[in-house]
Image: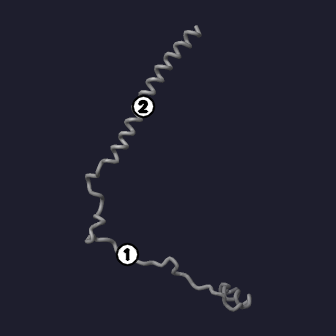
Amino acid sequence: MSAQIGATSAAVGSVVGRLFEIRFGAFAGLAFAAMMLGGCVLPTAPLVGKDPADPGAKVAGVGYRSSIAPYSSLRPTVPSGWKEQNQRVTPTPKSGQ
């Protein structure tokens, strides 16, 4: 009985293997042909928007905004006392304190 099951599974396996190889080969060939022919197709519709090569095309204005606008020079200065530096940056006291 096990010899019969083994022979049947071998026969089914070889048939399925051949069908898979044929179908996989056909699918791979079809996919390859689609990719090759897809690169040859020219666009029939114009691109969205104005033609970039048209010198008379209206475009949005260009503004300038500095990326380093809040920059202030931090060149070396004369050292000052730490008490004076702390007094400059301490918050003002609230009334009643």
Point out the tag, 2 or 1, that comes first from the N-terminus: 2
Q: Is residue 12 left or right of residue 1?
A: left
Q: Is residue 71 left or right of residue 27?
A: right
Q: Quadrant of residue 62?
A: bottom left
Q: Is residue 96 left or right of residue 15?
A: right
Q: Is residue 8 above or below residue 85?
A: above
Q: Residues within 10 Å of mark 1 (few under 14, many from 20)?
A: few
Judging from the image, what secondary structure is the residue with disc 2 in?
helix
Residue placed at 66% from the left, 87% from the top?
76
Q: Is residue 27 above or below residue 4?
A: below
Q: Which residue is mark 1?
A: 62
Inspect the image, locate mark 1, and give the three-letter code of the amino acid beneath it. Answer: Val
Judging depth in this view, the residue of 61 and 81 nearest the camera is 61
Inspect the image, locate mark 2, and give the three-letter code of the amino acid beneath it. Answer: Gly
Q: Quadrant of the N terminus?
A: top right
Disc 2 versus disc 1: distance between alpha carbons?
Answer: 55 Å
Q: Which residue is mark 2?
A: 25
Q: Is residue 94 visible?
A: no
Residue placed at 39% from the left, 31% from the top?
26
Q: Position of residue 3 (x, y in %)?
A: 58, 9
Residue placed at 33% from the left, 43% from the top?
37
